[in-house]
Amino acid sequence: MDEHGVRTRELLRDGVSWRTVYGQKLHRPFFGMRCATEPAGHIALCRAAAVILPAEALFSHRSAAVIHGMPLPGWAEPEEVEISVFEPTRPPRVRGIVSHQLTPDEHRWAVVDGLRVIAAQDTWAQLSTRLQVPDLVAIGDFLITGDEPYSQKPPLLTRADLEAAVRRHGRRRGVTTLRQALARIRYGSLSPQESRLRVALEDSGLPAPELNHVVRASDGDRVEAMIDLAYPAARVAIEYLGDHHRTDTSTYRNDIRRRERLVDSGWDVIFVTAADPFDDVALRVRRALHRSSTR
C-alpha cells in the first residue's frame, strides 16, 4: 500500500478482502480511500486527500498556507483540507474537504513537494478574507524575508510578487485588508511575533522600530548583538523571547549575556514574551523612549 493511501476500489480490485478493507486496521481519512497509518499533521492529511481528489484540484487557502510553511496564527490552523478548482470545473464534495471554485486569471499555482498548490503570493491574498492586518503582515514579512539574513538563501517571494497578487485580486472580498497589510510589510523580520509586535507598536502611535539591528563592539568588527526591534538613536532595544528562549538552557544564558552587553553599552532592554499584552509593551517602550529623551 502506498504510504499516503490507496483508493478503496483499487484495494478491492487487487484482491484485498472486504474484511481487511472495511475492518479496523486500516484508516479512512476520507471516503473512498484507505491508508495504513493515520495521517500525522496537516500536510500528511493533504497527501491522503490527494489520493481521491481529481487531477485538476489544487490545495488552497489555509491548507496551501501550511504547505508553503506560512506562520498562521494558532486559531487559524486548518482542521479540514481546503482545495480549489478553476472555472468551469465544479468543485468536488467530500466530507472533510472544503472546496472552492476560482477564476483562473486571478491565481497562479505551483508544485510543492509533489503537491499541486495555489502559489504562495495568491495563497497570501486568499487569506485576507479570514485574517486581520497584523497576521497578514506577519505572513508577508515571512514571504519576502525567510531566513535570508542568516542563511543568505533567497526568500520565497519579492515585494513585487505580493504587489502583483493584490492587483490580480483587486475586486475580491478582503482586498482592502490586503492593501492595508501590503503597505506595512517589511523585509527583515525573523519571526511572526516580531512582525505582530512591530505592527502593534506602530498602531499605538510609536515610531516604526528598526528590524534586527546589529550592534557592533567598539572596534567596529565584532557583533555584540542583533536586536529584534530597536530604536538606535534612543538606545532602546526590544527582544521577543519565544518559548525556546525559556526551555533551552543555552539560549536562556545567551539572552542574559546579550542583555548585559547591551546594558553595559547604554541600551535600555525590554524583554517581551507571549504572556505580555502588546498594549502593555507599547507603554513600556514609550516610557523607555521618554527616559532616553530626558537623559
Image (spheres, grey):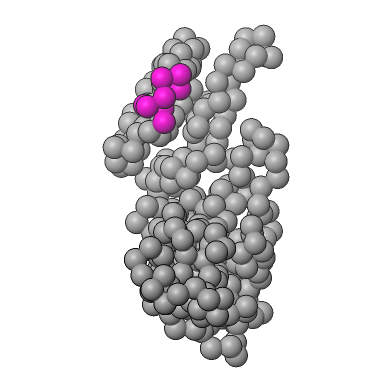
Q: Nearer the viewer, residue 166 or 43?
A: 43
83 sits left or right of 121 in the view: left
Dominant secondary-structure state across the stretch colored magenta: helix
| Residue at position x 65%, y 52% in the image | 156
Q: Nearer the viewer, residue 226 or 89?
A: 89
Is residue 211 something one can see in this rendering? yes
Q: Position of residue 113 (x, y in %)?
A: 64, 57
Residue 149: within the magenta?
Answer: no
| Position above or below: 288 against 29 | above
Q: Nearer the viewer, residue 103 or 260?
A: 103
59 sits left or right of 21 in the view: right
Q: Position of residue 252 (x, y in %)?
A: 41, 21
Q: Which quadrant holds the C terminus?
A: top left
Q: Which of the 4 quarters of the picture holds residue 129?
A: bottom left
Q: What is the total number of numbered labels drawn onto the structure image?
A: 0
236 sits left or right of 280 in the view: right
Residue 245: within the magenta?
Answer: yes
Q: Which quadrant holds the N terminus?
A: bottom right
Is residue 133 something one can see in this rendering? no
| Residue at position x 48%, y 50% in the image | 71
| Residue at position x 34%, y 56% in the image | 75
| Position above or below: 49 against 249 | below
Q: Nearer the viewer, residue 228 or 232?
A: 228
| Position above or below: 186 against 257 | below
Q: Which of the 4 quarters of the picture holds residue 247?
A: top left
Q: Position of residue 217 (x, y in %)?
A: 61, 12
Q: Specify the segment rendered in magenta.
A: 244-251
| Residue at position x 41%, y 70% in the image | 20
